[in-house]
Image (cartoon, rainbow, N blue to C red):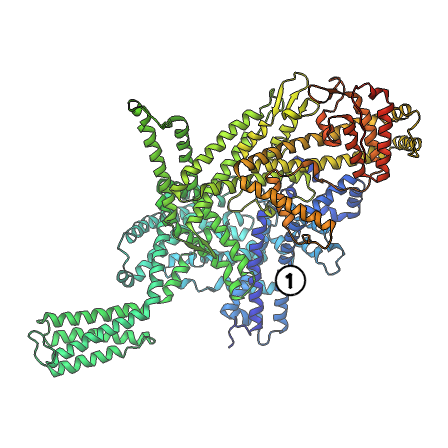
């Protein structure tokens, strides 16, 4: 008969593909459950208020038109809805595709069953498939995996979240208009069940059977599958567990499948007492906590509580006397095998000969170890018992008491068992690879010994006191030929013949009185030894490895192992060499990957790589989590070293009197430093003892693991220091900014010095790691802060700065800012507020308007450079750019609202335009015309002034940052600064030349040179913020005229100061604009004429040439005729081209 899994067997391949797909879907669901956007949970009141009107559950489907009309009635909600769509459509689509694949899975399975019943697969029916070993396995797995999918979805992705995601996908995608969309079916399958995975949550009625019945499955198929699982050992596991007390462990995987599938036919659980008694007696006589898939545990005492027949059948198992008996038995077994395993692990005990002679004994020990570990880990797990259930608490207390449960002893047993198993497997693998070569070697050696003895008895080869004996000579030659004739391929016949040859050699020694000759006896003994080795070698079979693989399964602990993390870490902290034993434990845990990957591999599915990467990545993440204790311990020691170096140990001067040598010796602190440094090197040595290991499909390099661990700990500590160090009290006077920056600078310097100190002892590039990680922290925080100004947010999983292995921690915001960089920026803006301070350009200093005391100066940016480095200043500059863009957008909105939509203002501006047209001569009665326009538009200047001051303030800050960056670059990297300046000049010259002569070269659109060089130039401060284009707009009507009116409305508030050679405020009590902001918005000259010149230039850039001429002409009229401005006692020169 054709092999069921053969490639040309369509029936087998179809169900294999379905099962393979099922395993891949579960992996995708588990993967996605870690990326649920927090906004869909609507836990925070802020989220509820902001998104409550645009995120809907299935109540939306009762009247979608009503909900959509409510959205359309409010433009701000529409805008928020569109922003939400842009930010979440990608992840929502990914979730929808996963949900769709679950529905498609059960549809495909039902179609396969229909095809079987309709005879589509020739000579195959449901009955014949269930008679085939592979067939019945796959059919059972197909239904079981569907049940697991539904349970995983409900456990990992709560019902309300599913509904909100499905509705969002429906609203934001084309699903509603697609004719072939199965959106309705998916929603019916995955609507909320009312189940909650939160501890103490009540179980919904008829759960999960009503959930499982949402898509009907063939009842005959369910009944036949349950029948097979009840009666057969479908995976032939009992052969690996010959002892009767191990039967429930042997059938554990089958028991998990039966548990899930019984929910498809709940009548058995409710009323079929005989069947349930049979199931419990076979699968659950001594256990009631099971693992259903990759460590997802279920306590049957709780799960079967609502089902009468199941609960009654389980009562015998849960009887306290049985609980006590099982707990006591496993306590005894674990104590016995612990001693045995420790004996086996003694150096030199597990030799090849010993292993080959004691295979059954060693395997029995392994079985006992793994069965005891499994039972104790499952039945003592906190997650398996509801603390609110009195009966479950009582059972757990009974187990803990009678099993004398000690998690450290259980962990030690797991560690020793894993090490023992690993050594045995490695020995067997090596012996299997060398099996034939060794067998041939022993055969050759035995044959040669017999040939030599034949030569001895022939009289040709002299040997002391051995007479010639032709009979023995012929006999030994025959034995030699017999040994040579042994065939490796026919191991059974060769084994029997070898035993006969050994007996013959023993008999010849006795009957021919050869004992008297020690040399002949030695030859015979050696030959018998080689023949014995041949028997041992021929008995090395792959079945032993397979049995060890089955027995050593640790998939049940995929999640439970996390409860032992603290014990593992404490063990490593006390003894870093413990890492080598942990390596074996991690490899044992990696065996859990075989369960989901087996069918995917058999089906040659393209999902193999992604599923392998997911589970391997999860395991590697756990390895990193456990081993993170090493970097943590190293940093703890480092902090002590830094404290000793900075506070206790006095630096030895270059010249020193010998009398003072003792004072500078400081032996005690230096000994303490040496001791701590030695401890750090020991930790490093511990992790490097773990060899490069293949965990799943990911290669784990211990050196890389150590470096990543150090990076992770550094990131955690530096990020926390930045978060804690840059929290400001806005009411503090004077500002806390400079003291906090100095304090943070000292902390950062301590980290930096510690890295310089440690790098040689742990063989890492300290400065490289420091710069990479600090830049990553700052850039990530800048990115998150800038998200506030972006419509399409950059999520963590999209960020180029965030990492899975070395995550940058996120902290709860303490004010309107999301991160420390936002708090720093807003504190700088607060203390340099133009309403409270005045900036003196020549001194680069801000002074308080009332007290005339210095508020801050350019030293602030030097301090930021010292504390946060170039990355910090550059990030601050980038954030200011986003803020300026936001302010300019607000300015445009304000301009549209208060000018372009205000009829009064528009009428005033039109009247002004008519009054001054045409532009041929000086306007008559200009004073009246202009100040009448100013008076009528007075209400708009407050908002206009506010916008200009904000942008001007930030532009000045950007200039200061650019100056500090440029100074720092020239001082620290003069060659880089020179190279960048020259390259910039050369590029600009080439571009100018191209515009003069288009035949000359110019960078193409796909050439990234200009973009890349811009990033370098901004980082080096080689740029002018005043020349930066922040936003582009369409031509704004009346913009030059409004600017002109604004200018002449504000100029009377200023006067020229000869001492400062600049314009200053006349009266501090009036609303005012500091000189710096005039300079930013309208240009800088030493006279008002120059000011007007730049005003004209700006109006030219912003509008047409005609507008420019108009503006210049009217400016001239005001300067010449306005008595108000004439009183300023300034030289007025107009130079406008």
- Dot 1 alpha-carbon crowd within 10 angstroms: few under 14, some 14 to 19, many 20 or more: some
Is 850 rendered above or below residue 515?
above
x 64%, y 30%: residue: 826
Residue 1098, located in which quarter of the rendered image? top right
Side (left or right) of 938 relative to 55: right
- Looking at the image, which is closer to me, 900 or 230? 900
- Would you identify the image quadrant in which residue 510 lies? bottom left
- The residue lying at 11 percent from left, 80 percent from top is 460
Vertical position of residue 743 compared to residue 1028: above or below? above
**Rendered location of residue 1055, percent (x, y):** 76, 20
For this view, does 131 lie left or right of residue 367?
Answer: right
Check the image and report above or below for 852 versus 68.
Answer: above
Total number of numbered discs in the rendering: 1
Mark 1 — residue?
A: 107
**Residue 921 locus on image (x, y percent):** 92, 31
Residue 403 visible here: no
Left/right of residue 579 with respect to residue 508 in the rendered view: right
Q: Residue shown at 16%/71% (left/top)?
A: 523
Quarter of the image containing the C terminus? top right
Q: Secondary structure at mark 1?
A: helix
Which residue extends farthest top? 851
Using the rendered image of the protein, determine whether residue 23 is visible from the camera's viewpoint.
yes
Towards the viewer: 1048 or 735: 1048
Picture coordinates of residue 459 (x, y %)?
10, 80
Residue 770 screen position, x and y as percent: 49, 40
- Judging depth in this view, the residue of 268 and 1102 nearest the camera is 1102
- Judge whether 843 appears above or below 256 on screen: above
């Amino acid at each position: 008969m054709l092999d069921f899994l053969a490639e040309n067997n369509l029936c087998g391949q179809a169900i294999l593909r379905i099962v393979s797909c099922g395993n891949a879907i579960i992996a995708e669901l588990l993967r996605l459950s870690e990326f649920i956007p927090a906004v869909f949970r609507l836990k925070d009141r802020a989220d509820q208020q902001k998104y409550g009107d645009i995120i809907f559950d299935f109540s939306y489907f009762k009247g979608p038109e009503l909900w959509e009309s409510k959205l359309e009635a409010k433009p701000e909600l529409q805008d928020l809805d569109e922003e939400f769509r842009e930010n979440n459509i990608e992840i929502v689509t990914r979730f929808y595709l996963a949900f769709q694949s679950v529905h498609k899975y059960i549809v495909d399975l039902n179609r396969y069953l229909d095809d079987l019943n309709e005879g589509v697969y020739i000579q195959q029916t449901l009955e014949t498939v269930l008679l085939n070993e592979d067939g019945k396995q796959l059919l059972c797995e197909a239904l079981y995996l569907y049940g697991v999918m539904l349970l995983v979805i409900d456990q990992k992705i709560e019902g309300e979240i599913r509904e909100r995601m499905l509705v969002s996908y429906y609203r934001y995608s084309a699903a509603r208009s697609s004719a072939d969309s199965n959106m309705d079916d998916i929603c019916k399958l995955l609507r909320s069940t009312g189940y909650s995975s939160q501890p103490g949550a009540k179980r919904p009625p008829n759960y999960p059977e009503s959930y499982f019945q949402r898509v009907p499955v063939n009842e005959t198929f369910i009944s036949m599958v349950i029948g097979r699982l009840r009666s057969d050992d479908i995976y032939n596991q009992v052969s690996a567990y010959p002892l009767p007390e191990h039967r429930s462990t042997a059938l554990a995987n089958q028991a998990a499948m039966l548990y899930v599938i019984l929910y498809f036919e709940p009548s058995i659980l409710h009323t079929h007492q005989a069947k349930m008694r049979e199931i419990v007696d076979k699968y659950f006589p001594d256990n009631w906590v099971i693992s259903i898939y990759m460590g997802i545990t279920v306590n049957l005492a709780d799960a079967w509580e609502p089902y009468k027949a199941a609960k009654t059948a389980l009562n015998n198992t849960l009887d306290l006397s049985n609980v006590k008996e099982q707990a006591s038995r496993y306590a005894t077994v674990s104590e016995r095998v612990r001693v045995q395993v420790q004996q086996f692990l003694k150096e030199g005990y597990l030799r090849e000969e010993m292993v080959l002679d004691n295979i059954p004994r060693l395997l029995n020990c392994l079985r006992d170890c793994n069965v005891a570990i499994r039972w104790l880990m499952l039945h003592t797990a906190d997650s398996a018992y509801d603390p609110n259930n009195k009966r479950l608490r009582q059972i757990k207390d009974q187990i803990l008491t009678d099993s004398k449960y000690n998690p450290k002893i259980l962990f030690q047993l797991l560690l020793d068992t894993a090490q023992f198993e690993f050594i045995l497997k490695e020995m067997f693998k090596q012996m299997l690879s060398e099996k034939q070569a060794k067998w041939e070697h022993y055969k050759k050696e035995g044959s040669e010994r017999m040939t030599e003895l034949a030569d001895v008895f022939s009289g040709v080869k002299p040997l002391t006191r051995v007479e010639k004996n032709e009979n023995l000579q012929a006999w030994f030659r025959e034995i030699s030929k017999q040994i040579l004739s042994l065939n490796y391929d026919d191991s059974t016949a060769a084994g029997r013949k070898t035993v006969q040859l050994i007996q013959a050699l023993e008999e010849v020694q006795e009957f021919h009185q050869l004992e008297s000759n020690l040399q002949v006896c030695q030859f015979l003994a050696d030959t018998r030894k080689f023949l014995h080795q041949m028997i041992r070698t021929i008995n090395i079979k792959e079945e032993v490895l397979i049995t060890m693989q089955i027995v050593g399964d640790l998939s049940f602990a995929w999640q439970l192992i996390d409860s032992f993390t603290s014990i593992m870490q404490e063990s490593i902290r006390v003894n870093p060499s413990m890492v080598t034993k942990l390596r074996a434990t991690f490899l044992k845990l990696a065996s859990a990957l075989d369960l989901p990957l087996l069918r995917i591999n058999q089906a040659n599915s393209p999902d193999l790589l992604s599923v392998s990467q997911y589970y391997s990545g999860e395991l590697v993440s756990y390895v990193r989590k456990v081993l993170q204790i090493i970097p943590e311990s190293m940093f703890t020691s480092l902090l002590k070293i830094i404290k000793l170096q900075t506070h206790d140990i006095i630096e030895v001067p270059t010249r020193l009197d010998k009398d003072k040598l003792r004072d500078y010796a400081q032996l005690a602190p230096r000994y303490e430093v040496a001791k701590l440094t030695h401890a750090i090197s020991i930790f490093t040595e511990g992790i490097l003892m773990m060899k490069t290991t293949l965990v799943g499909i990911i290669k784990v390099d211990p050196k890389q693991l150590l470096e990543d661990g150090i990076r992770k700990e550094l990131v955690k500590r530096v990020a926390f220091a930045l978060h804690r160090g840059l929290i400001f009290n806005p009411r503090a006077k004077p500002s806390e900014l400079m003291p906090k920056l100095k304090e943070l600078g000292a902390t950062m310097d301590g980290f930096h010095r510690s890295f310089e100190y440690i790098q040689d002892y742990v063989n890492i590039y300290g400065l490289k790691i420091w710069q990479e990680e600090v830049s990553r922290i700052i850039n990530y925080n800048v990115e998150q802060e800038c998200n506030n100004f972006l419509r399409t947010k950059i999520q963590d999983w999209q960020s180029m700065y965030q990492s899975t292995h070395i995550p940058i921690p996120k902290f709860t915001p303490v004010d309107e800012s999301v991160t420390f960089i936002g708090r720093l920026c807003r504190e700088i803006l607060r203390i340099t507020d133009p309403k409270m301070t005045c900036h003196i350009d020549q001194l680069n200093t801000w002074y308080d308007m009332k007290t005339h005391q210095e508020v801050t100066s350019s030293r602030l940016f030097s301090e930021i450079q010292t504390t946060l480095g170039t990355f910090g200043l550059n990030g601050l500059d980038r954030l200011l750019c986003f803020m300026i863009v936001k302010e300019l957008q607000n300015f445009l909105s304000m301009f549209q609202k208060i000018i372009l939509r205000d009829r009064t203002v528009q009428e005033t501006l039109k009247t002004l335009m008519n009054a001054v047209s045409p532009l041929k001569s000086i306007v008559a009665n200009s004073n009246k015309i202009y100040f009448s326009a100013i008076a009528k538009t007075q209400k708009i200047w407050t908002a206009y002034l506010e916008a200009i001051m904000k942008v001007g303030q930030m532009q000045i800050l950007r200039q200061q940052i650019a100056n500090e960056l440029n100074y720092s670059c020239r001082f620290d990297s003069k060659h880089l600064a020179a190279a960048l300046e020259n390259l910039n000049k050369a590029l600009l010259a080439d571009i100018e030349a191209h515009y003069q002569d288009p035949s000359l070269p110019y960078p193409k659109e796909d050439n990234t040179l200009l973009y890349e060089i811009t990033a370098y130039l901004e980082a080096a401060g080689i740029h002018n913020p005043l020349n930066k284009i922040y936003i582009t707009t369409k031509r704004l009507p009346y913009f030059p005229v409004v600017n002109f009116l604004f200018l002449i409305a504000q100029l009377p508030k200023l006067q020229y100061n000869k001492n400062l050679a600049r314009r200053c405020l006349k009266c501090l009590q009036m609303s005012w604009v500091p000189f710096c902001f005039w300079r930013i918005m309208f240009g800088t000259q030493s006279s008002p004429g120059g000011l007007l010149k730049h005003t004209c230039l700006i109006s030219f850039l912003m509008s047409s040439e005609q507008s420019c001429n108009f503006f210049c002409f009217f400016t001239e009229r005001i300067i010449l005729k306005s008595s108000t401005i004439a009183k300023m006692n300034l030289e007025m020169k107009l130079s406008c081209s």
